[in-house]
Image: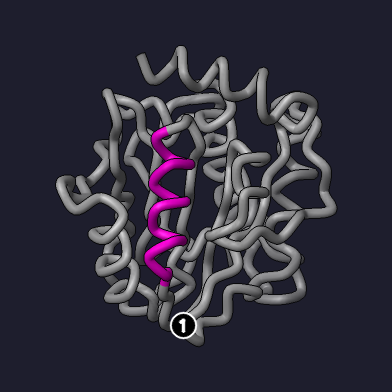
C-alpha cells in the first residue's frame, strides 16, 4: 500500500524533482548547517556512479514547510540539540507516511535529542537496529558487515537504526559513524581516500534505497 502511495506522490507532487535531495533546517541550537560540502559531494558521487541526476546545489528545507514534500530524500546532521514544534512533528509524520525518506546522521552529540524527537513523530513505534543483511547495505555497493565506521568519536561501534512503515524503511538514523564527515572535501578532515570512498559508497546506497523503494 505504501509503495502505491509513494508512486502516486512522486508523480503528483515531486514530478521532475523526483531525484532532488535537501538539507533539513531545524531549531534547538544545533548546527544544522554542519558539513557544508558533504551533500554536494554525495550528489556528485551518486551522479557519477549510480546514474542519478541530483542537483549538487543542495536546497535547505524547514521541517514545517510544505516544500518538504518536494524532496524524496532529506538529510539532517549537527552536533547538538534538535527541537521540532508540534506543527513540524505533524508535517514530518505526514511526509514520512507519504513516502518521503529522512536520514539523520549524528555528527556527534545529537543522540539524546534525536531519540526524544523521533519518539514524538512516531509515539507508537520504536527505533530498531537495521541488520547487515538489509538491502540498504547490499546495493549497489556491498557492506556485508553493515554500517561502516568513519570517525571514532567515543570509539563505539557504528549503528544504523530505523523506523519502518509497512516494511519500508522511511527513517534512517546513523550513529557513531559520522558519514557526513566522510562525504566532505578531503582537506576538511584529511581522511584517507579509502575511508572517504567507503563513506560515499554507503551514502550512495542510502540514496539508491530512498529513490528506488
| Along the viewing direction, whichever of 153 and 2 lies nearer the viewer | 2
**Residue 81: image location, x then y, percent:** 41, 82
157 w.r.t. 41: above or below = below
The residue shown at (42%, 36%) is 143
For label 1, the crowd category at 10 Å Cα-Cα, with few meaning under 14, some 14 to 19 and many 20 or more, is few
**Residue 162: image location, x then y, percent:** 30, 45
Q: Is residue 172 magenta?
A: no
| Along the viewing direction, whichever of 136 and 73 lies nearer the viewer | 73
Q: Quadrant of residue 23?
A: bottom right
Is the image coloured rainbow, by chain, by secondary structure, or in one colour? one colour
32 w.r.t. 180: above or below = below
The residue shown at (35%, 27%) is 168
- Magenta stretch, overall SS: helix
Residue at which label 1 appears: 28
The residue shown at (33%, 50%) is 160
Callout 1: SS: loop
Q: Quadrant of residue 191?
A: bottom right
Report the span colored magenta.
84-97
34 w.r.t. 172: above or below = below
**Residue 53: image location, x then y, percent:** 80, 31
Q: Is residue 23 left or right of residue 149?
A: right
208 w.r.t. 88: above or below = above
Quarter of the image with the N terminus in it: top left
Amino acid at each position: 500500500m505504501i509503495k502505491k502511495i509513494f508512486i502516486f506522490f512522486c508523480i503528483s507532487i515531486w514530478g521532475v524533482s523526483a531525484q532532488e535531495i535537501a538539507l533539513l533546517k531545524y531549531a534547538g541550537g544545533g548546527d544544522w548547517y554542519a558539513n557544508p560540502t558533504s551533500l554536494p559531494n554525495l550528489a556528485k558521487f551518486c551522479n557519477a556512479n549510480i546514474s542519478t541526476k541530483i542537483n549538487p546545489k543542495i536546497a535547505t528545507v524547514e521541517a514545517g514547510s510544505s516544500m518538504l514534500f518536494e524532496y524524496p530524500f532529506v538529510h539532517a546532521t549537527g552536533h547538538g540539540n534538535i527541537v521540532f514544534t508540534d506543527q513540524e512533528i505533524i508535517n514530518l509524520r505526514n511526509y514520512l507516511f507519504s513516502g518521503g525518506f529522512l536520514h539523520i546522521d549524528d555528527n556527534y552529540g545529537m543522540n539524546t535529542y534525536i531519540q526524544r524527537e523521533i519518539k514524538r513523530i512516531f509515539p507508537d513505534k520504536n527505533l530498531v537496529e537495521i541488520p547487515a543483511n538489509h538491502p540498504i547495505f547490499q546495493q549497489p555497493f556491498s557492506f556485508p558487515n553493515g554500517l561502516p565506521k568513519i570517525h571514532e568519536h567515543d570509539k563505539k561501534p557504528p549503528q544504523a537504526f530505523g523506523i519502518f512503515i509497512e516494511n519500508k524503511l522511511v527513517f534512517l538514523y546513523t550513529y557513531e559513524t559520522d558519514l557526513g564527515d566522510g562525504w566532505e572535501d578531503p582537506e576538511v578532515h584529511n581522511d584517507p581516500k579509502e575511508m572517504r570512498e567507503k563513506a560515499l559508497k554507503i551514502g550512495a546506497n542510502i540514496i539508491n534505497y530512498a529513490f528506488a523503494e
